Image (cartoon, rainbow, N blue to C red):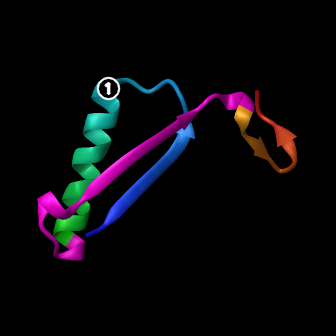
């Protein structure tokens, strides 16, 4: 069972997440030859202030 975790800044709409989940699932079904019901997508959102890139806080 493929599990995809998307970690990113908070703020995307439910519609955006639904579209991303559909497209990632389609990709795994097509390329990974798995069944739709076996693909899990998990969104982990956190505020920008919780991220550092290149040693610099983003928030």
- Range of the magenta residues? 31-49
Q: Residue at x 16, y 72 (%)?
A: 34
- Dividing the picture into quadrants, the one containing residue 30 is bottom left
Quarter of the figure that contains the C terminus? top right
User: Exactly how many numbered labels are in the figure?
Assistant: 1
> For numbered disc 1, what is the local secondary structure?
helix
Residue 38: give x, y in percent of width and height.
18, 63
* Residue 32 covered by magenta stretch: yes
Q: Residue at x 17, y 66 (%)?
A: 29
Q: Is residue 58 left or right of residue 38?
A: right
Is the residue marked by circle 1 packed among few (<14), some (14-19), or many (20+) residues within 10 Å? few
Quarter of the figure that contains the N terminus? bottom left
Q: Is residue 40 left or right of residue 6?
A: left
Where is mark 1, residue-wise?
14
Q: Is residue 26 left or right of residue 55?
A: left
Q: Is residue 13 above or below residue 1?
A: above
- Dividing the picture into quadrants, the one containing residue 3 is bottom left
Q: Residue at x 16, y 76 (%)?
A: 33
Q: Is residue 2 above or below residue 42?
A: below
Residue 58: give x, y in percent of width and height.
77, 33
- Dividing the picture into quadrants, the one containing residue 25 is bottom left
* Residue 37 covered by magenta stretch: yes
Q: Residue at x 74, y 29 (%)?
A: 49
Residue 37: give x, y in percent of width and height.
13, 58
């Amino acid at each position: 069972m493929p599990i995809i975790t998307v970690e990113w800044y908070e703020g995307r709409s439910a519609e955006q997440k639904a579209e991303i989940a559909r497209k990632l699932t389609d990709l795994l079904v097509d390329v990974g030859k798995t069944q739709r019901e076996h693909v899990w997508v998990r969104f982990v959102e956190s505020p920008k202030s919780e991220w550092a890139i290149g040693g610099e806080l983003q928030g």
